[in-house]
Amino acid sequence: MHGLFPLGAARRRLGPLVQLPEDQIEIPPEILADEIVAEIDEQLLWQSWEVTRLVPPEMRRPYSFLLAALLVAERRGSTRIALEGLERALAEVGMPEAERPKVRALLEAESVLVGERRPLAIDGGAIYTRKNLV
């Protein structure tokens, strides 16, 4: 599973002919750790990466973990992650404990991805992908 990249593992390995801005977005290596990899496949990585491209560079790493956690929860049959269980969900996708407060700070602020007509929503003490908020 190491070396997966949403634009294509072969493209990454051989090197792109033209550097594109999205080539600069890295998937946190912790997400690709062997003990986490069972829950995460290329489709989940691509979805997470695609949404993460919408945020400024300094927000991409925390959002990568948050999106991975939400998508893994969806794969397990949940529609959301309770905010009180967010720490555990982030740990399950490999986010270092010292970095987890960054996600809380992003969620408490009116952020790029959370809110009206944005990919993520907070409602009733839980965070959802917009498609699952009904």
Image (cartoon, helix red, strand yellow):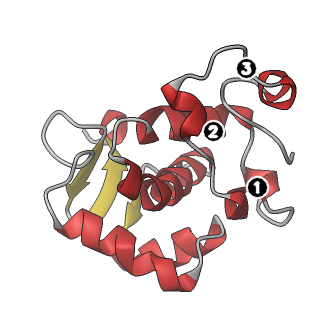
Q: Is residue 31 left or right of residue 115?
A: right
The residue that appears at 76% across and 62% down in the rendered structure is 36
- Residue 132: which disc? none
Rendered view: 100 above or below 22: below
Q: At which x and y percent is residue 61?
A: 49, 58
Q: Nearer the viewer, mark 1 or mark 3?
A: 3
The quarter of the picture where the N terminus appears is top right
Rendered view: 126 above or below 71: below
Q: Earlier in the sequence, mark 1 or mark 3?
A: 3
Residue sticking out furthest to the bottom: 98
Q: Which residue is mark 1?
A: 32
Camera-side residue of 124 and 102: 102
Element type where label 3 sits in the image: loop
Q: Are marks 1 and 3 in contact (CB under 8 Å)?
A: no
The residue that appears at 32% across and 58% down in the rendered structure is 127
| Image quadrant where residue 84 sits | bottom left
Element type where label 1 sits in the image: helix
Mark yes or no: residue 20 visible: yes
Q: Residues within 10 Å of mark 3 (few under 14, many from 20)?
A: few
Q: Which residue is mark 3?
A: 16
Q: Nearer the viewer, mark 2 or mark 1?
A: 1
Q: Residues within 10 Å of mark 1 (few under 14, many from 20)?
A: many
Q: At which x and y percent is residue 39?
A: 73, 52
Amino acid type for the residue under numbered disc 1: Leu
The quarter of the picture where the C terminus appears is top left
Cα gap from disc 2 to disc 1, whole angstroms: 12 Å
Q: Are marks 3 and 2 in contact (CB under 8 Å)?
A: no
Q: Which residue is mark 2?
A: 44
Cα gap from disc 3 to disc 2, whole angstroms: 23 Å
